[in-house]
Image: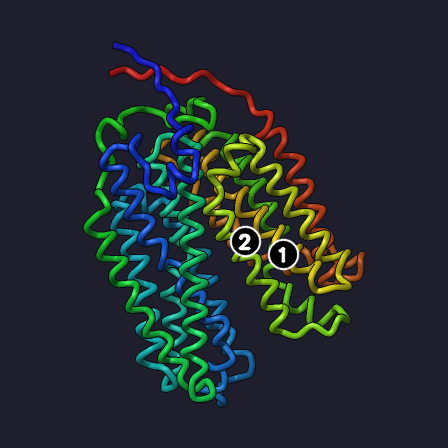
Amino acid sequence: MVTTRVSKSNNQNSVIGVIGGNMKDLSATSRKAVIAIMAISLVLLFGSMTAPLLEYIKNSYPDIVEGSEYLILTIPALVGMAVSFVIGPLAMKINMKYLMIVAALAAFVYFAIFALVGVSNFSLLLVGAGIVGICQGAAMVLTSSLFGAYITDAAARANYVAISGALMNGGGAIVNIVGGMIASGNGGADWPHAYYLGVLIIPAIVVFWFIMPKQPDPVESAAGPSEGAEGGPAAPSGFIPIKAFLMIALATFVFICLAGFLLNVSLYIVGELSIGATSSEAGLANALFTILGVVAGFTYPIISRFLKNWVAVLGWAFAACGMFMVVFLNTQIITIYVGACLLGLGFNIANPFVMAQIMAVTPPRWIPIAMSIMMGAMNLGMFLYPYIFGAISAPFGGTIASQMMLGGFGIAIGAALGVFLFAFAKKSPAPAVAE
């Protein structure tokens, strides 16, 4: 008997359907997977707590070489970049449930080292920094790949990826706030105490261990290709299609252009602008990007319902407007804040949509590889950003402002190209599935 798969995204493409827990269109196995992934997502960005505590850590080691303290932040990025590329191939041979547990345990070990070693051994802190890079590089690849394995509908996948990202950012923001309060005790000398918050990672791992299934239901895994955003089929066999690589390349290009804000906003506001802004005000601009990322994640089901295939295009357009506000309307700190909000909202509504589209056109077996390539390319792009934009901005003065200006134009170009790749993409009829 042959039936036609009908997309069930309408019910799931709403805040009530996804956030409210109405997942009746999913099998019991898929519901368990969603709950488990959301639980573990809460702790995967706990490692971001270190950045605001770096000054306290530096003060505890006055004898280290000047600038060495930054290795605590750069080593995780380098390790994470390498892990992003290798975690996909590993996921094809090792159950992703176990890989996710290893990633979360890496974050726990990191917190344990910083809490127990504290002010006694800087070299061990660097070892811990390398270990947390495992979690940093694997988190997004594994969560998105797991949704790809257990959720067949592309629109629903995007919803869950967005909410998972919001939970990551939200968990990181909360631990940053609480950890900062704890670390400030005794003039900052109590910063190791903040890392006892890492104990919260253990309950998340336990919940994930017991709830997360080992494999999707046989019917789900054997159902053939996943559906596209409008019911179109993915490639039934073979390797990652050219269209997926084009999506990855475009998303990476946009992210590199946007990285100028993430890397340089504090230096730009405090150093280049003459508006009397403090590092605290610059930090708020960076925080607004994250806060709007959380908002975008939780409201993505509503936003995507109205924007449909224009999600990435309009999201990147918002981000380009935000970058231009930061560069050209910079006489008031409030306009920079608005620009930061547009950047955070735009990027974080576009990214889950693009990831879902990549999964929709990729054979299920190769989804972890596609996600690995995408996240690895983004991490590599951020690492290479200073060299790339330092060179191309030289004719415009080589300032941070010129780099972000070029980044804004790059994001706008990405939005224009997205019209052809996403908004006007051809739709295919729903595939027939043999029962």
Q: Which class describes the residues within 10 Å of circle 1: few (<14), some (14-19), or many (20+)? A: many
Q: Residue at x 44, y 27 (%)?
A: 228
* Foreground residue among 416 and 95: 416
Of residues 327 and 244, the one nearer the viewer is: 327
Color encoding of the figure: rainbow
Would residue 65 be found to the left or right of residue 403 on screen? left
- The tally of labels here is 2
Q: Position of residue 122 (x, y in %)?
A: 41, 81
Left or right of 2? Residue 85 is right
Of the numbered discs in the image, which one, if any, rests on residue 370? Answer: none
Which callout, 2 or 1, points at the residue further toward the start of the chain?
A: 2
Which quadrant of the rendered structure holds the N terminus? top left
**Disc 1, SS:** helix
Q: Is residue 52 above or below residue 324?
A: below
Q: Secondary structure at mark 2?
A: helix
Q: Amino acid at mark 2?
A: Leu
Q: Which residue sits at x=47%, y=62%?
A: 78
Rendered location of residue 24, percent (x, y): 29, 32
Q: Which residue, given by chain and number where applicable, does mark 1 sit on?
A: 340
Image quadrant holding the C terminus, namely: top left
**Residue at coordinates 21% horizontally, 42% vertically from top-left?**
214
Q: Nearer the viewer, residue 237 or 144?
A: 144
Residue for badge 2: 292
Q: Are marks 2 and 1 in contact (CB under 8 Å)?
A: yes
Q: Rounded to the nearest whole Å, what is the CA distance between mark 2 and mark 1?
A: 9 Å
Residue 190: image location, x then y, percent:
40, 84
**Which residue occupies the extreme top position in the image?**
1
